[in-house]
Amino acid sequence: MSGKTILITGAGSGIGRATARAFHAAGWRVALMGRREAALRETLAEGLILPADVGDPAQVQAAFDRLAAEWGRLDVLFNNAGQAAPAAPIDEIPVESWLSVMNANINGMFLVARAAFGLMRRQDPQGGRIINNGSISAHVPRPGSAPYTMSKHAVTGLTRTLGLDGRRFNIACGQIDIGNALTEMAAAFPGGVPQADGAVRAEPVMDVAHVSDAVLHMAGLPLSVNIPFLTIMARDMPYIGRG
């Protein structure tokens, strides 16, 4: 895979960090986008560091302008950046929390995908692959998760549309839906989290390396092949039968 290029958003922590390191180890050229430059450099000092807020159109465009100038092309986008809000019934969720989640998880996903699609469409040879980070919550919610769940259902709509619109430009689009990878976001799960029946129970987690391995597999396929949706999860987490 020497010479292949990938941009990873949300690369300063969690799944983004693990995936960036895995692609670098596999011989890819890796660009890292996130709000915290120091965190990006901690992830991978050798990568192309692109500090940017994915929800800011001007910052996203500036990052892609720099990427195009440095590399000339982009083979894969891992559209990973996102955030959650504290769990609560919808009438107790501050509007500010709602807007913040939507800006990262919907606006950010759209803006970065838009810029990547445009670059892939116009580069020579034409084409590339976009992999969106969905979630188990793109299928079923956790209690009190209206903003996050709504945003992840929207990601599925983006994936389906890009998968259709990208065909004539040799652009493939797929989505990875991840359940209980052990990152900062899932750190509380082994100690117990609220369930649909009101109980609080511990949930199993999996090593985040399994996620980065799955993204590597999706990215390594020829553009004539696509995995539209891939679900990877800790085997015994309450997804099958959640609720």
Image: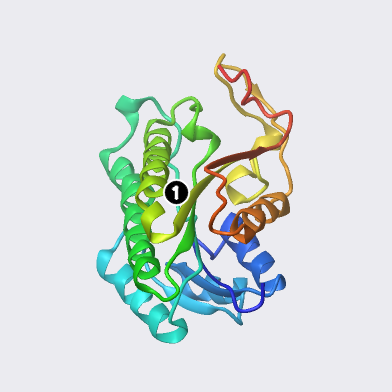
Identify which residue, 189 or 171, lies in the foreground: 171
Q: Residue at x 33, y 43 (%)?
A: 97
Please identify the quadrant where the N terminus is shown.
bottom right
Q: Residue at x 47, y 63 (%)?
A: 128
Identify which residue, 215 or 189, lies in the foreground: 215
Can you tell which quarter of the image residue 20 is in? bottom right
Identify which residue, 197 or 139, lies in the foreground: 139
State the image coordinates of residue 62 (x, y, percent, origin top left): 31, 76
State the image coordinates of residue 139 (x, y, percent, origin top left): 50, 29
Label 1, secondary structure: give it.
Answer: loop
Q: Provide the residue designation for mark 1.
A: 83
Q: Is residue 4 above or below residue 9?
A: below
Question: Going by the image, does 97 lie left or right of 240?
Answer: left
Q: Is residue 118 above or below residue 221?
A: below
Q: State how many labels appear.
A: 1
- Using the rendered image of the protein, determine whether residue 179 is visible from the camera's viewpoint: no
Can you tell which quarter of the image residue 222 is in? bottom right
State the image coordinates of residue 205 (x, y, percent, origin top left): 71, 39
Amino acid on which disc 1 is placed? Gln
Q: Is residue 158 above or below residue 29?
A: above
Q: Residue at x 38, y 25 (%)?
A: 89
Please identify the quadrant where the C terminus is shown.
top right
Can you tell which quarter of the image residue 124 is in? bottom left
Q: Is residue 236 above or below residue 20?
A: above
| Badge 1: residue crowd in 10 Å (few <14, some 14–19, many ≥20) | some
